[in-house]
Image (spheres, helix red, strand yellow):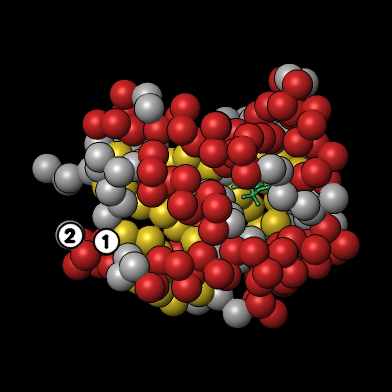
């Protein structure tokens, strides 16, 4: 039997986190908790959170720490995450979020924090070609040869470009990543919880590196 896992995947936007988290979630049988997906769902529902988050997200900014910590605290208190564990994707994004997460998970600490390392030139190329199913979040790479309307192979939903994958918003998000999220790498390295995994390669190669990294840390 495969044991569960309590993981964080860090990495620049476009490093392949979404794709790898979906595979890791099936492998370890734990929920993939993407705070970006939670916010996009709130935007689709038109909730108060969604209306507030939309303008921040479209501009490539970050939603406030207090709101994000509240969302994650609630999600991690649910039975699946309390039992087998979880994979966090997109959270924490700032050091205050990481400190709050340590408090939330004090009883059952994280197994490992993985930094999926992909050079920024490659990430820029990937983001401009990225397309996403608006219903289930499956990621695709556009080649220009797709038949339109493009429908998702997994659920039949519409595959489209994310509103925040415009060149301006991509530039802003990558700058923000360097400023606010890369200090997290230091935070987790200093506390001995970080493993850096090379994210360049085929999805299968990267997936095997990730599962090896988790297994060797437990
Ligand atoms: P992502 O899908 O992870 O790239 O997230 C999309 C957008 O949602 C980000 O550009 C932020 O505006 C917002 N977001 C997601 N997670 C967080 C977080 N942990 N803290 C602040 N904003 C977030």
> Dividing the picture into quarters, in which one does residue 53 lie?
top right
Q: Residues within 10 Å of mark 2 (few under 14, many from 20)?
A: few
Front-lying residue, 90 or 68: 68
Q: CA gap, disc 2 to disc 1?
A: 7 Å
71 horizontally vs 85: left or right? right
As helix, strand or loop, the secondary structure at mark 2 comes to loop
| Quadrant for the C terminus in the image | bottom left
Residue 130 shows up from this direction: yes
Quarter of the image containing the N terminus?
Answer: top left
Label 1 CA crowd tier, 10 Å (few <14, some 14–19, many 20+): some
From what the image shows, is residue 143 above or below residue 76?
below
Where residue 130 sits, quadrant-wise, is: bottom right
Residue 217 image point, x, y percent: 21, 65
Q: Residue at x 41, y 54 (%)?
A: 8
The answer to which of 34 and 64 lies nearer the viewer is 64
The x and y percentages for residue 106 are: 30, 43
Left or right of 5 in this view: 126: right
Looking at the image, do the residues carrying marks 2 and 1 touch, with CB atoms under 8 Å apart?
Answer: yes
Towards the viewer: 124 or 140: 124
User: Does residue 148 appear in this view?
Assistant: no
Picture residue at 69% right of the left edge, 80% below the top = 121
How far from the left and from the top, in percent, is residue 212? 25, 67
Measuring from the top left, give residue 175's x and y in whole percent.
Answer: 74, 69
For the point 72% across and 49% down, the residue is 62
**Which residue position holds label 2?**
218
Determine the image quadrant of residue 66: top right
Q: Which residue is mark 1?
A: 214
Residue at 47% x, 40% y: name it. 33
């Amino acid at each position: 039997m495969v044991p569960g896992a309590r993981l964080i995947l860090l990495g620049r936007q476009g490093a392949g986190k979404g794709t790898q988290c979906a595979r890791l979630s099936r492998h370890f049988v734990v929920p993939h908790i993407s705070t970006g997906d939670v916010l996009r769902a709130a935007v689709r529902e038109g909730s108060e959170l969604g209306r507030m988050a939309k303008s921040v997200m479209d501009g490539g900014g970050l939603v406030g720490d207090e709101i994000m910590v509240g969302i994650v605290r609630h999600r991690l208190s649910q039975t699946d995450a309390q039992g087998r564990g979880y994979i966090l994707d997109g959270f924490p994004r700032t050091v205050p979020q990481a400190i709050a997460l340590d408090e939330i998970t004090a009883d059952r600490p994280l197994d490992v924090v993985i930094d999926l390392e992909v050079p920024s030139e490659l990430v820029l190329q990937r983001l401009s070609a990225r397309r996403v199913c608006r219903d289930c979040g499956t990621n695709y790479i556009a080649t220009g040869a797709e038949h339109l309307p493009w429908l998702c192979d997994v659920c039949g939903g519409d595959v489209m470009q994310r509103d925040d994958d415009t060149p301006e918003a991509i530039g802003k998000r990558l700058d923000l990543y360097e400023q606010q999220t890369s200090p997290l790498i230091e935070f987790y390295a200093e506390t001995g919880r970080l493993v850096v995994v090379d994210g360049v390669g085929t999805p299968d190669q990267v997936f095997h590196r990730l599962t090896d990294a988790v297994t060797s840390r437990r």
